[in-house]
């Protein structure tokens, strides 16, 4: 194995880099708190849909199933939404602590949380792109079979 020039690479943060990371941490905290608030609204909406579904059990073609199904969908979306928000919140709180305590281990943990946030969002994006491709394929196939 050949040694690269980055094997002994020691990163030093100047004041501009520290300032950028502090500002990023503040914005990450803001976005994660707003996200948790909206996630709470989603959970409240899911509970409202569950209760409305049980109240209107005879209404509509699906009875109370429509409200329960939509409530379940909202709960699933809120559960999925929790993880990137949690990683973002971890990043923001750890980056703040890293600079308060001047601790490079906590800084590494903060950057690890940021990596986990983007990894989750990236995988989720890939899953949705694949889902869209499959749905487009089925829509085209249904259109062709309907035309015949």
Image (cartoon, grey):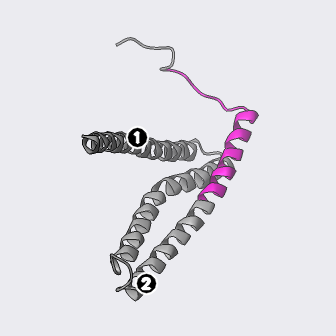
Judging by the rendered image, the residue that carries numbered circle 1 is 129
Judging by the rendered image, the residue that carries numbered circle 2 is 51
Magenta range is 8-32
Quarter of the figure that contains the N terminus: top left
Q: Quadrant of residue 102?
A: top right
Instruction: Give the mark nearer the N terminus: 1 vs 2.
Output: 2
Q: Nearer the viewer, residue 12 or 143?
A: 143
In the rendered structure, does residue 17 fall within the stretch colored magenta? yes
What residue sits 47% from the left and 58% below the top?
81
Count neighbours of disc 1 (C-alpha within 10 A) and say few if under 14, some if 14 to 19, many if 20 or more: few
**Image coordinates for residue 108, horizontal then vertical, percent:** 53, 42
Q: Nearer the viewer, residue 94 or 101?
A: 94
Q: What distance separates the C-alpha of mark 1 from that of mark 2? A: 34 Å
Which residue is at the far front?
148
Element on which disc 1 rests: helix
What residue sits 41% from the left and 70% below the top?
70
Q: Main secondary structure of the magenta part?
A: helix
Say whether residue 84 is visible.
yes
**Image coordinates for residue 59, horizontal then vertical, percent:** 38, 83
What residue sits 70% from the left and 35% below the top?
17
Which residue is at the far top?
2
Horizontal side, residue 114 vs residue 12: left or right: left
Quarter of the figure that contains the C terminus: top left
Q: Nearer the viewer, residue 81 or 50?
A: 50
**Image coordinates for residue 14, horizontal then vertical, percent:** 72, 31
**Rendered view: 8 above or below 32:** above
What residue sits 46% from the left and 74% below the top?
46
Q: Nearer the viewer, residue 132 or 98?
A: 132
């Amino acid at each position: 194995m050949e040694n690269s020039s980055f094997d002994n690479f020691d990163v030093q943060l100047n004041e501009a880099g520290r300032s950028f990371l502090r500002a990023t941490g503040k914005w990450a905290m803001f976005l994660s708190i707003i996200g948790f608030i909206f996630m709470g609204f989603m959970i409240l909406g899911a509970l409202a849909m569950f209760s409305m579904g049980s109240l209107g059990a005879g209404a509509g073609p699906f009875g109370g199933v429509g409200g329960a199904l939509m409530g379940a969908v909202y709960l699933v979306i809120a559960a999925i939404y929790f993880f990137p928000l949690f990683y973002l919140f971890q990043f923001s709180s750890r980056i703040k602590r890293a600079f308060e305590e001047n601790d490079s281990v906590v800084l590494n943990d903060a950057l690890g949380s940021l990596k986990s946030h983007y990894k989750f969002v990236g995988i989720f994006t890939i899953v949705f792109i694949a889902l869209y491709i499959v749905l487009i394929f089925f829509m085209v196939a249904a259109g062709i079979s309907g035309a015949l």
